[in-house]
Image: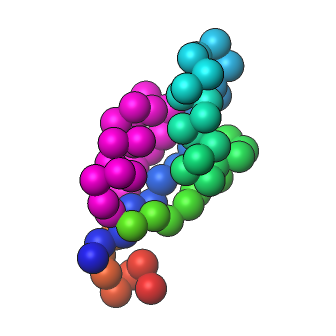
């Protein structure tokens, strides 16, 4: 299963509370922070909701380990 590197790039100030909650639930706290998450439909749905605030990079299996 592939992994996704999600980087928090734009502040949530001025955006709806549900988008702020989505960023927090992805594990992102500070601007510029990156997390690695599994590539599954629930994570993809969260990313779709905040796609204007984050940068997403697909990682091959051997790099994500």
- Residue 42 in magenta? yes
Residue 37, located in which quarter of the rendered image? bottom left
Q: In this view, which residue lies farthest toward the right?
A: 30
The answer to whether residue 11 is above or below residue 42 is above
Residue stretch in magenta: 39-58
Residue 29 at x, y percent in the picture: 71, 46
Residue 9 at x, y percent in the picture: 56, 38
Q: Viewed as shown, does residue 9 lie left or right of 37? A: right
Q: Residue at x 62, y 53 (%)?
A: 27
Quadrant occupied by the N terminus = bottom left
Residue 61 at x, y percent in the picture: 31, 81
Q: Residue at x 67, y 19 (%)?
A: 13
Numbered circles on residues, count:
0
The answer to whether residue 40 is above or below residue 65 is above
Quadrant occupied by the C terminus = bottom left
Q: Viewed as shown, does residue 19 lie left or right of 47? A: right
- Residue 5 in magenta? no
The answer to whether residue 32 shows anywhere in this view is no
The answer to whether residue 28 is above or below residue 3 is above
- State the residue in front, 45 or 28: 45
Q: How is the image coloured?
A: rainbow
Q: Residue at x 40, y 31 (%)?
A: 49
Q: Residue at x 55, y 26 (%)?
A: 18
- State the residue in front, 37 or 21: 21
Residue 62, located in which quarter of the rendered image? bottom left
């Amino acid at each position: 299963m592939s992994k996704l590197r999600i980087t928090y790039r734009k502040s949530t100030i001025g955006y709806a509370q549900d988008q702020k909650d989505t960023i927090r639930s992805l594990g992102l706290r500070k601007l510029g922070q990156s997390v690695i998450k599994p590539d599954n439909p629930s994570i993809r749905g969260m990313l779709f909701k905040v796609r204007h605030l984050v940068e997403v990079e697909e990682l091959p299996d051997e790099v994500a380990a």
